[in-house]
Amino acid sequence: MEKALIAFAAALAVGVPSIATALAQAKIGSAAAGTIAEKPETSGTMIILEAIPETMVILGFVVAIMIILQLA
């Protein structure tokens, strides 16, 4: 039972930030498309702003690995 809870915690550590990142990127992506249509020179900034929420998923993955390694 304990291993199942640890696996569930690791899944939550990746799943919740993934959902939040998807919602954030949906909003940022639509705003970036409008901004780039009006000012094409802002494309580099918009790409960076689109990539920033991905750090939440990466950190969630790191936390999940740390949780799983405690299982051993």
Image (cartoon, rainbow, N blue to C red):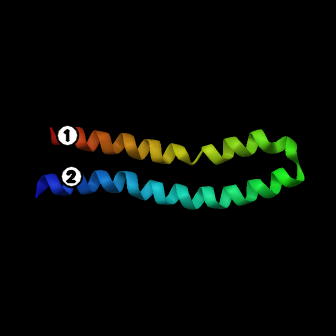
Q: Secondary structure at mark 1?
A: helix
Is the residue marked by circle 1 packed among few (<14), some (14-19), or many (20+) residues within 10 Å?
Answer: few
* Disc 2: CA contacts within 10 A as few (<14), some (14-19) or many (>=20): some
The residue sitting at 14% across, 52% down in the picture is 3
> In the current view of this chain or complex, which residue is farthest to the left?
1
Q: Which residue is mark 2?
A: 6
The numbered mark at residue 18 is none
Placement of the C terminus among the 4 image quadrants: top left
What amino acid is at disc 2?
Ile
**Against 55, is 2 above or below?**
below
Q: Is residue 72 left or right of residue 56?
A: left
Q: Which residue is mark 1?
A: 70
Looking at the rendered image, the quarter that the N terminus falls into is bottom left
Judged left or right of residue 25, residue 34 is right
Q: Residue at x 59, y 58 (%)?
A: 24
Question: Which residue shows up at 68% across the image and 56% down it?
Answer: 28
Residue 52 found in image quarter: top right
Sooner in the amino-acid sequence: mark 1 or mark 2: 2
Q: CA distance from mark 1 to mark 2?
A: 9 Å
Amino acid type at circle 1 is Gln
Figure disc tally: 2
The answer to whether the residues at label 1 and label 2 have Cβ atoms under 8 Å apart is: yes
Q: Position of residue 61 (x, y in %)?
A: 39, 44
Q: Secondary structure at mark 2?
A: helix
Residue plotted at (81% across, 58% down): 34
